Image: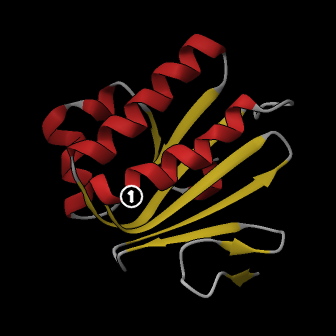
């Protein structure tokens, strides 16, 4: 996949990748009925727009039956990023699609523990379980 010269979006087809202020890399892929969002780096307010744009795919037909937030390589997560994931999960419950979160490591995971948001989400520790 080639990227746009400014580093903020895709050129061509295949998976889609966005970079925001060198903090977040978002790679979006679709396989069958699964939309996978792999977030690397820091997911804060600056990256919310890119993730919400990727989730716009849920408005197209046929809509994915599963959304996977792959957070294995996430170093930082703030309340804005967490809120985006929780909104997607609530939408999944309302619209009958599954939302899975691959648990981040280290300090990014603490947000799920401290806020108890991890209790509201379907979280897995290993991508192979997805």
Where does the image place residue 11, in percent across and percent down from the top left?
75, 76
Where does the image place residue 114, in percent across and percent down from the top left?
13, 40
Q: What residue is rendered at 71% in x and 29% in y?
A: 59
Instruction: Pick the residue in front: 23 or 34.
Output: 23
- Say if residue 14 shows up in the picture: yes
Residue lying at the far top in this picture: please name it.
94
Residue lying at the far front in this picture: please name it.
6
The mark tally for this picture is 1
Q: Which residue is mark 1?
A: 47
Pick the quarter of the image with the N terminus: bottom right
Q: Is residue 124 above or below residue 96?
A: below
- Say if residue 125 shows up in the picture: no
Q: Which image quadrant for residue 107?
A: bottom left
Q: Is residue 107 above or below residue 61?
A: below
Q: What residue is rendered at 50% in x and 50% in y?
A: 51
Q: Which image quadrant for residue 66?
A: top right
């Amino acid at each position: 996949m080639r990227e746009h010269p400014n580093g903020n979006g895709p050129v061509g087809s295949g998976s889609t990748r966005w970079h925001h202020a060198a903090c977040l890399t978002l790679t979006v892929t679709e396989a069958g009925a699964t939309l996978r969002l792999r977030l690397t780096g820091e997911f804060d307010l600056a990256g919310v727009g890119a993730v919400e744009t990727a989730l716009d795919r849920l408005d197209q037909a046929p809509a994915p039956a599963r959304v996977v937030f792959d957070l294995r390589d996430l170093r930082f997560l703030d309340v804005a990023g967490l809120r985006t994931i929780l909104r997607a999960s609530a939408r999944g419950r309302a619209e009958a699609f599954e939302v899975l979160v691959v648990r981040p490591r280290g300090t990014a995971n603490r947000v799920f523990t401290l806020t108890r948001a991890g209790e509201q989400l379907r979280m897995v520790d290993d991508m192979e379980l997805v």
